[in-house]
């Protein structure tokens, strides 16, 4: 094996002399096909390419997380707002008569239902409360805007308490907010006994 190693060195030196690369410094070596390792330029190019790919991947992941958070906030706002609207509409339909409305403003409605229970709703920014006859229970939080609008049977806005006997519809408008996402909702309710 020793003779084979010497022969390979001899052939390598002959090749170097023919190409004019026989002047090697102590810290440099020619890059030949059988040499092992990477050059500094190859390592730098690899680092730059990996950095670019990592940056693009990070932006894609960040955008996905932002979209997920936005959708989650919208879903939460929609669920809570929809539940509150459905409950208010269901209970307002059960008002016993127009004479049983005890308070009616743009943000408050209190009444007695067909079962004789005192009920009502009141918005105090940012909470929508349900009056149970004794105290307020939180119906929805994160309500950015809320209003009741009262209409007569001819479709014009009722001026309460003067038009209380002519009351026909009650509009509920609400804007739920969760984080930076808002969701406006509106419904019209006609109490059964009017």
Image (cartoon, grey):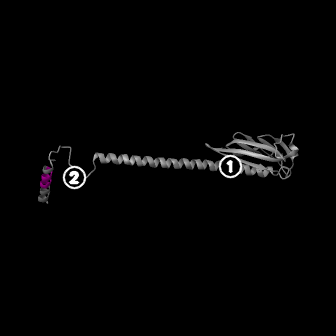
Per the image, label 2 sits on a secondary structure element best described as loop
Camera-side residue of 84 and 167: 167
Image position, residue 162 (x, y; %):
87, 40
**Neighbourhood count class around disc 1 (C-alpha, 10 Å): few under 14, some 14–19, many 20 upward:** some
Q: Can residue 134 be seen at all in this image of the molecule?
A: no
* Distance between mark 1 and mark 2 Cα atoms: 71 Å
Assign the magenta stretch its main secondary structure.
Answer: helix
The residue at the point 32 percent across, 47 percent down is 43
Magenta stretch, residue numbers: 9-16
Instruction: Tell me where residue 134 appears, x and y as whole percent.
Output: 80, 44
Return the x and y of residue 11 as percentages of the image width and height.
13, 55
**N-term mark: 1 or 2:** 2
State the mark number for residue 165: none
Whether 12 is among the magenta residues is: yes
Whether residue 41 is visible to the viewer of this picture, yes or no, is yes
User: Disc 1 vs disc 2: Cβ atoms closer than 8 Å?
Assistant: no
* Dot 1: element: helix
Q: Residue at x 71, y 45 (%)?
A: 174
Q: Does the magenta segment cover residue 77?
A: no
Q: Residue at x 11, y 59 (%)?
A: 3
Residue 133 is left or right of residue 36, and the answer is: right
The spot of residue 179 in percent (x, y) is 61, 43
The residue at 75%/42% (across/down) is 147
| Disc 2 packing (10 Å; few <14; some 14–19; many ≥20) | few
Residue position marked by numbered label 2 in the rendering: 32
Numbered tag placed on residue 80 in the rendering: 1
> Where the N terminus falls, by quadrant?
bottom left
């Amino acid at each position: 094996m020793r003779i084979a190693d010497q022969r390979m060195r001899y052939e390598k030196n002959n090749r170097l002399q023919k190409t004019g690369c026989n002047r090697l410094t102590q810290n440099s070596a020619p890059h030949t096909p059988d040499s092992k390792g990477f050059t500094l330029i190859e390592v730098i190019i690899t680092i730059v390419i990996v950095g670019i790919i990592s940056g693009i991947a990070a932006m894609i992941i960040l955008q996905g997380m932002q979209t997920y958070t936005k959708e989650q906030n919208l879903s939460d706002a929609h669920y809570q707002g929809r539940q509150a609207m459905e409950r208010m509409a269901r209970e307002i339909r059960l008002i016993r008569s127009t004479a049983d409305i005890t308070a009616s403003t743009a943000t408050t409605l209190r009444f007695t239902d067909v079962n004789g229970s005192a009920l009502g709703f009141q918005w105090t920014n940012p909470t929508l409360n349900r009056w149970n006859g004794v105290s307020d229970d939180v119906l929805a939080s994160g309500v950015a805007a809320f209003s009741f609008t009262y209409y007569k049977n001819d479709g014009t806005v009722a001026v309460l308490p003067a038009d209380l006997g002519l009351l026909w519809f009650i509009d509920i408008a609400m804007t739920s907010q969760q984080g930076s996402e808002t969701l406006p909702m509106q419904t019209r309710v006609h109490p059964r006994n009017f």
